[in-house]
Image: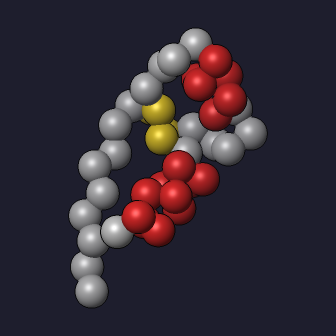
Amino acid sequence: MTYKLKVKGTIVSDDIAWIYDLFDIEHTSPKKDRNSTRKC
């Protein structure tokens, strides 16, 4: 089965993703992608 994910914003590591969340900057991180694939 194949899935397509739309990746928006800068790709960042999980370690600094909280900074992007803090300033509400659009980003994608590995943790976010894992959570997205679980919803499929």
Numbered circles on residues, count: 0
Left or right, 6 with reference to 30 = left
| Residue closer to the observer: 11 or 39 | 39
The residue sitting at the front extreme is 39
Q: Determine the image quadrant of residue 13.
A: top right
Q: Is residue 15 above or below residue 32?
A: above
Q: Residue at x 67, y 22 (%)?
A: 19
Q: Is residue 5 above or below residue 25?
A: below
Q: Nearer the viewer, residue 36 or 11?
A: 36
Looking at the rendered image, the quarter that the N terminus falls into is bottom left
Above or below for 38 versus 25: below
Residue drawn at point x = 53 percent, y = 62 percent: 34
In the image as oriented, which residue stretches furthest toward the right? Answer: 15
Q: Is residue 18 left or right of residue 32?
A: right
Applied colour scheme:
secondary structure
Q: Measured from the top left, where is residue 4 in percent x and y?
A: 25, 64
For residue 15, which quarter of the picture?
Answer: top right
| Rendered residue at 48%/19% (across/down) | 25
Residue 11 at what x, y percent from top left? 49, 39
Quarter of the image where the C terminus is located: bottom left
